[in-house]
Image (cartoon, grey):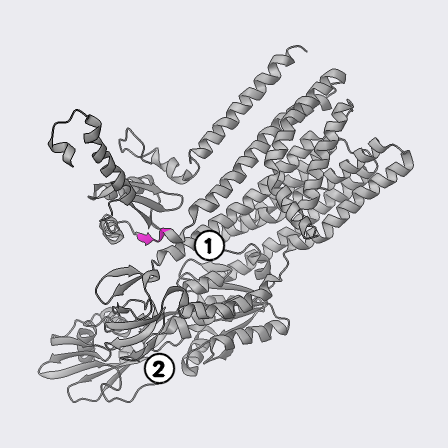
Amino acid sequence: MNVLVYLIPVSLILGGLGLAGFFWALRDRQFDDPDGDSNRILSDDYDDKPKR
Amino acid sequence: MAGSSTISACPACIAAPEAGAVAARKVDDASILLSLPSIHCAACISGVERALTAEPGVLAARVNLTLKRATVATDPAVTPERLTDVLARAGYEAHELDPASIGVTATDERSRALLMRLAVAGFAMMNVMLLSVAVWSGASEATRDLFHWISGAIALPTIAFSAQPFFANAASALRVWRLNMDVPISLAIVLAAAMSVYETMQSGDHAYFDAALSLTFFLLAGRYLDHRTRTIARSAAEELTALEVPRALRASGETVAVAELVADELVRVLPGARVPVDGVVLEGASEIDRSLLTGESLPVAAGPDTVVSAGEVNLTGVLVVRVTAAGKDSSLHRMADLVAMAETSRNRYRSLADKAAQIYAPVVHLLAFVAFGGWLWASGDVRLSINIAVAVLIITCPCALGLAVPAVTTAASGRLFRAGMLIKSATALERLAEVDTVVFDKTGTLTRGQPELIGISGYDKADLAVALAVSEGSAHPLAQSLSVAIRREGIAPAALTELREVPGQGVEGRWRDRRVRMGRADWLQAEPASSTATYLRIGDRPVLTFCFVDALRDGAEEVVARLKERGKDVVLLSGDVPDAVADIAGRVGIEAWEARLLPADKAARIAVLAKSGRRVLMVGDGLNDTAALASAHVSISPASALEAARVVSDIVLLGGSLAPIAEAISVSRSATRRIIENFAIAALYNIIAIPVALAGFATPLAAALAMSGSSITVSLNALRLTRR
């Protein structure tokens, strides 16, 4: 059962990373235009820096 | 810039003024918001962005496909009209939006905050559930305690963060000594968490951390759905408002916002434009279309000293108007008192969810209290009694009830949105389902407000050719409708010379040395017809009369027929003259109609109907309908309605057709049925679970199963609405 000492923190940290990723995406306004983003991937326009 | 002409030892001194200039330009940069209703694909996005950025003065352009909008950062010199022209040439329909009318940020922040709380609750719930599985499958003693402590360490901060909306609502209800749905919710969450901490400290068998968290999660999901549905409706309604950028043309030729105008200023109103203010005509002659304000379908002559109100449309000549009241003081505002009085009656409506909460909340508290008292009396064990009381609270907690209404309204509003209806009010669907009487307005609601020529076959072809040539010299709606009707017959215009428009009277020209005049009856000394008409005199020949009827809106007859089929009473209330109203009533098949009604009369008729126990649906578009719309049980207005009318309506029709109204009523009926079914499902779960909990057999496993089971059943039942 000693393995729990490592496994539980590891699982929490991994889950926490996912949560932090979601927060980042939310703050970064990545959910503001879901339809547009799914279509933009098909566009051929060359842009080295995404427009704001 | 002294520094730039001399060589300086201080490079920053040279750079600084330029940096200042850059900063100054940044502040001046204007942001223009455009609505792009027709875009739908990846090619549209890049097409619009390329067209906009190619335009000089445009700094950046970004399309949002979800909202079908573009945000354009520009130099102050770039006007919105230029950008919409550029897009029209590129093949995209574009309209300017008034950024001030769109309160994107506030609602956006709130839904983002809710989503964040939901995500945290979901994350914590999953982790604690996994730990609980170990406990349920037999972990004991030290391991179980360790798992409980870890669960607690995850659950307590999560509850403190995620359950805040419930705590806040419960606190505000308790402050005024009332019970709402959030009181038992908050109590169950807090008691479950506190009890679990105590049990963990005593190294007890059961902890309810997972139950407290899944409760928070499911209820937050309901809140989020509810919030999102309303945000979508509100943002679409705001967009309709933002499409009408309130602008006026000063007599000096300068375009200004209506808000900047003050009394006694002079404004110029061009033909075809809406009168921006209340005022008195100073010079010019024209005709005025008052249909949105009074329901009259016939245009009225306007000349010096005619009083005009905001919202009327100027038809033929240029008018110079002296402002008597602008913006918030205009006639639109006078209607507000009437509306405010009417609305109080509707605020008394109690939604199904409120009714359920009113019965539910006291029963739950009573049951928990009885469980505690009963077990204390029977066993004398305080800890056991509290445990059972908490189990009762958790099991009966209105998880499914919290989802029952929002899941259904989200599904129903989504379906109606696709059919072209915008549900603005949260309880509109429930109220719509109860409707037994439907009241229509005439001009602009049952009719399109556009005249249509009748009996074209009765005229001579040569006369029609002359009429076509004359009518094409005018922007008057009757003339335009006439020319469309004649062109459809395949007739070419006659050759006319010296064509000119006489403001407020008509059009004049010369054909084979004979004077040709088309316009108002009194200008041609003709006998006026009883309906909307225009008159043509060629030389000395007798006057030809062209009669028009108001074209019916698409789906008007169909909707009336379907409503009658379902046994609803259909009534037509109009401010127009009796002849015109009788004609339209006959064409759509309405027997009960009244004409020449003032705005207050319409509201009074609806009040009488309401007093006799009728649930009235009012469909109207004009300023004269606003009071009636507000006093009806539920109200619908088309997107072409005045903003004041759309604001007081519960539902806005986005398309041109009236047909979705019949569908809306049937969807609202099935939505209400689903809500009641959902309440029944939730009650059924409780009827099974409460005896188990009272008997003291409710383990955390049973609580978790009951809660998830009922929530999922309720959501699935709601989803059935999205399909026919």
Chain that bears disc 1:
B
In the image, what residue occupies the spot 23% across and 38% down?
A: B21
Q: Which residues are magenta?
A: B95-99
Residue B33 at what x, y percent from top left? 33, 48
Note whether residue B315 is visible.
no
In the figure, B11 relative to A29: above or below?
A: above
Q: A36 or A20: which is nearer to us? A: A20
Q: B334 or B430: which is nearer to us? A: B334
User: In whole angstroms, how far apart are the C-alphas of marks 1 and 2?
Assistant: 35 Å
Which residue is the site of mark 2? Answer: B531
Give the image quarter of residue B4: top left
In the image, what residue occupies the spot 58% across and 46% down?
A: B407
Magenta span dominant secondary structure: strand
Mark 2 element type: loop
Q: Tell me, yes or no, whether the two marked residues, 1 and 2, touch with CB atoms within 8 Å.
A: no
The amino acid type, in three-letter code, at marker 1 is Ala
Q: Is residue B268 magenta?
A: no
Mark 1 element type: loop
In the image, what residue occupies the spot 56% across and 36% down?
A: B118
Q: Which mark is residue B419?
A: 1
Note whether residue B124 is visible.
yes
Give the image quarter of residue B155: top right
